[in-house]
Amino acid sequence: MATDVTTPRERAAGSNIYESPPRWRALASVSHKSVAKRFVVTGFVFFVLGGIEALLLRVQLMQPEFDFLSADQYNQIFTLHGSTMMFLFAVPVIEGMANYLIPLQIGARDLPFPRFNAFNYWAYLLAGTLIYSSILFDAVPDAGWFAYTPLSGPVYSSGIRMDFWLTGVTLAEISAIGAAVEFIASILKTRAPGMSLNRMPILAWSMLVTSVMLVMAFTPLVVGSLLLESDRLFGTTFFDDELGGSQLLWQHFFWIFGHPEVYVMFLPAAGMVSHIVQTFSGRPLVGYTFVVAAILAVGFLSMGLWVHHMFTVGLSDAAIGFFSAASLTIAIPNGIQVFAWVATLWSGRPRFQAPLLFSIAFMLIFVIGGITGVMVAVAPFDWQAHDTYFLVAHFHYVLIGGVVFPLMGAVYYWFPKVTGRMMSDRVGMVSCALAFVGFNVTFFPMHWTGLLGMPRRVYTYLEGTGWEGLNLWSSLGAFVLATGFALTLLNAIASYRNGEPAGANPWGADTLEWSIPSPAPAENFARQPVVTSRHPLWTLPEGEPAARPVDAQAEEESPSGVAGDVDASEAVAVVPARWRNTLGTGLLDARPLEVVHLSRPTFVPIVPAVGLAVLGIAAITKSLLVALVGLVLLLGGVVAWVVVNERERSEAVEDVPEAAPVRLNVSGPGGVGWWGLVLSLLILGVVLSSVVFSYYYLSFQNESWPPLLQDGYPPPVLLPTVAVVLVLLSLVPLHLARRRSREDPSADIGGTVAIALLLGFLAVLLDLLTWTVLVDFGPRTDAYTSAFFAVAVSVLAVAVLALAGVVLLAVATRVRRLHPRRDYLLRNFLSLWYFFVIVSVVAYLVLHLIPEVTS
Amino acid sequence: MSRPAHPPQLTERPARLTAELFGLLGPPSAWMATLLVSYVTTDLMCDAEVGDTPTRIVLAAVSVLALAVVVGSAMTAASVRRRETGEDPVAPVGGRRKLLATVGLLLSWVFGLAIVMTLLSALFAEPC
């Protein structure tokens, strides 16, 4: 089977511009493969740290009343263990692997926003560094990885321990959400020509759904963390019951994130297993359509399960019933995936090598975790098992079984593609056997310790409880499990140096990453392939590449007859070789639409990431000066980033001829940049929705609203009404500018844009005047005033963003008239302004008009 | 060579795309709306002490409405799928339409069942 779709000369030509800088300057690399390797290596370092912490916990619980760790040390270590495994290992490693694999599987040269991708890594690294640096200050977080209030609030965690946790976790979440934007835009808009949705690899479907879940579920936790930090730092009262706040608000925020988080880790891992199972069975996955439906169903259902973590907080029977029903339903799509894997193995000719063994171990363990999941979805059982070791057993079966075992299998499977060398299969089999036995010896007894009543999160237990023997088994098993996983890590290190050289496709697999040499060349595909099958490397006869260079495109890929349709061969023929690029294609059927400019290596993304970390340090040290430094680094970094990007794109714009069938950076929904912007606005929308949710949740939880405030309610309505009218009026000049620019690309629209800017600026001034001078309360009075200012600050943040965007646009049009092929600038800023208008109207309704009408 | 100013962005007519999206995303959206509306409605109506029976009637109405949306989505997906009969399942356009329509039909079953279970909770559990 010929697998290389590129010629050596083409590869050599491509390598010049796609190679990462040498030596220490490699840190400036923004290539998806470099960033991916950083994510994976850093993630596994944290995995080792989290594993060591787990072993320390198991030593402490090995016998009753043991004093290996004090209660305080135990709390610190179990908080670090949970936080490390959830925030610093599982999600980042999955993101790292997807970072490497997704562009290769969909036939792209890189992710569409390489600098943003690098920024996400630096933010993640700094998040982990921040959390672990707490060890140096004897301030390790100790309120659990769930950080329940009031334990994590200012009263019961008065030091700086939880500040480390909150700032570190927030930074890690920002990184994860950023990566999600990359994956969604990449999978939807940069698939190789011909890769219509029905030809997409299962891992791409998994990552697409997972990334949407990341945006929808992780963003509320960022908001929750900021509100909790605000309680700790500024004395607001979101989680203070005595002042109208609510402890349960935190639980809602945490579990709206926490439950989808499980599937954020599981779905990509299951996607990897789908590839391993079909490759090692030597046949296509049985029930591709069913598996795609299952992935989508799990994605949606997982967003509606969070309340099953709160069955014991005092909900009505009906409310419990709604969430119990949803929790039971999710077993169906998960079961479909398991049946698909079993059917594929059953109907194929399985080769029992290390990747498949880890996948089979995953299936066995995950099914047990799924069954205990159904048990705890039944509320009466959950009331008995809640906060016992039964839950610890259940979620480790789901998380280690459902995530770590597949990841280990994936390491064996894709290691040759990344390094060009094979890992030892024999060591892999021993590793899998040890891990499987060790895992079950560790966690199966915990079902019993839980049913016998042993609570979780306790540092010791009394003799005579009947838990002693079971705990001893769990502790011994943990060391066997650790040995199993350590063997794989050692195998990887040894194989990286001395492993057998791997060919392009050592497993005889079907997806595009196996069509190029191992390790993958810098440019991935010197000429991007055209896909004609769901299994590109399996379909065509021996000797003929299934994924062909684009200019060899076949007749069956001819345009559909839609006016202006472009065929792939013409599209790629115009792509220049002097700057990095990849093809942008249509969302549904992957028809070529644009040439996406990919940015060059630079250190710039490190600056805003450091700025965010310094802002975190400011929250920990409560220093205004440090906060100012952080803000300067953040804003300065962003401005430098925009300037460098636009300079590079200005150089590139002339390289794509006017009459070319595809253009550089198409504006509007056809362009990947527009999708990046819309996804960013979606994130901001989720932020604002979460803040408004807090406002109304707190109002429903209190018998009177405001709970304590005596005077000043409702707040003034006159000036905010004028402000919202001004904001709406600002749409008129922006629309005029858009129309003029469309009719005459060389028209000067700076003046018209400036009018919109002035109207927006006046509106913000009026709102500021109302919120700082005219209202009779501050944010600390009660839950109402805290929620009021949270909404106000969110609107101001969006306003600053929108105004800064329009200023930038006005300057760009004044200094250099907008190039007709860079009108994406105007369209993107217009979208941002629309969002600002919507946010202003919502805030006006929530803060001023509805209170005025209802009071 | 004359080219349009902007390449086309989708290969579907808006009406057809809307039908495909409704067939695909209608069932999960209906379920999500049912879950959230039922949860909030229970809280509000119980706080207002309107009684169990009126609360049950409202909750049942929400679920029945959502089931109607699911049935509508399923019929739309079935219609899209029927039109593509005979297409190669991995052909670029017809295959994609057929895949999304089949996935929509499967989602209709899963989320229809989830809504029925929500309805049963509303009818048989104490709302307040």
Image (cartoon, grey):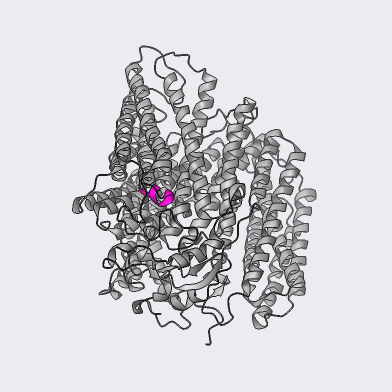
**Is A415 one of the magenta-colored residues?**
yes
The percent coordinates of residue A457 (x first, y second) are 46, 25
Q: Is residue A706 left or right of residue A474?
A: right
**Residue A816: image x %, image y %?**
74, 72
Pick whichever, A791 or A550, lies toward us: A550
Asked whether A430 or B38 is in front, the reply is A430
Give the side of residue A271 with respect to residue A679, left or right.
left
**Does the rendering let one see residue B128?**
no
Check the image and report above or below for A367 versus A589.
Answer: above
Residue A150: % across, % down = 57, 31
Position of residue A407 relative to residue A194, above or below, is: above
Residue drawn where x is 45% and y is 31% of the image:
A51
Q: Residue at x 31, y 50 (%)?
A: A276
Indicate the position of residue A605 as horizontal and vertical percent values: 63, 52
Relative to A209, does residue A60 appear above or below in the rendering?
above
Give the quadrant of residue A799: bottom right
Q: Main secondary structure of the magenta part?
A: helix
Say which quadrant the C terminus of chain B sits in: top left
**B5 within the magenta span:** no
Instruction: Decide if residue A206 is in sight here.
Output: yes
Left or right for A764, reference A253: right
Q: Nearer the viewer, residue A266 or A231?
A: A266
Q: Which residues lie in the magenta part?
A: A413-421
Quadrant of residue A722 within the rendered picture: bottom right
